[in-house]
Image (cartoon, helix red, strand yellow):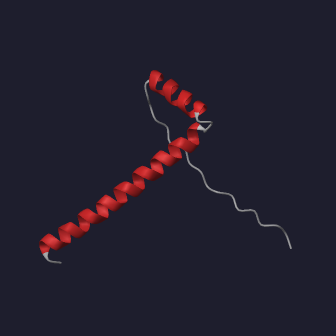
Amino acid sequence: MGTILFMSKTSEIKIRVEPELQERFKLVCDIESRSVSAVIRELLTTYVEKRELELQQDMFADKDKTGS
């Protein structure tokens, strides 16, 4: 039987930032010995998890107001 390899899917997000901010960000990542991609993934994950929780709380609060 052959070996099955699982590959994670990736996608790209292009953003525009000021050159100075990009350089500062890269410098901080280098100082922390972290890749820019890893830090951005962490930031995105943290943001999405926080906002999902807030949105869920807002939905429950709206239901309480309407009595549903």
What residue do we see at 56% from left, 48% from top? Answer: 11
What residue do we see at 57% from left, 41% from top? Answer: 37
Q: How many marks?
A: 0
Is residue 4 found left or right of 45 in the rendered image? right
Query: Considering the image in quadrants, where does the N terminus appear?
Result: bottom right
In the orientation shown, which residue stands out farthest toward the right? 1
Q: Position of residue 65 (x, y in %)?
A: 13, 70
Viewer-proximal residue among 5 and 27 = 27
The vertical placement of 22 against 60, above or below, is: above
Viewer-proximal residue among 50 and 62 = 50
Quarter of the figure with residue 12: top right
Viewer-proximal residue among 59 and 10 = 59
Query: Considering the image in quadrants, where does the C terminus appear?
Result: bottom left
Quarter of the figure with residue 61: bottom left
Quarter of the figure with residue 55: bottom left
Q: Position of residue 54 (x, y in %)?
A: 30, 59
Is residue 29 found left or right of 1 in the rendered image? left
In the orientation shown, which residue stands out farthest toward the front? 32
What residue do we see at 46% from left, 45% from top? Answer: 43
In the orientation shown, which residue stands out farthest toward the bottom? 68
Q: Position of residue 35 (x, y in %)?
A: 61, 38
In the orientation shown, which residue stands out farthest toward the left? 66
Q: Position of residue 9 (x, y in %)?
A: 61, 55
Is residue 9 found left or right of 57 in the rendered image? right
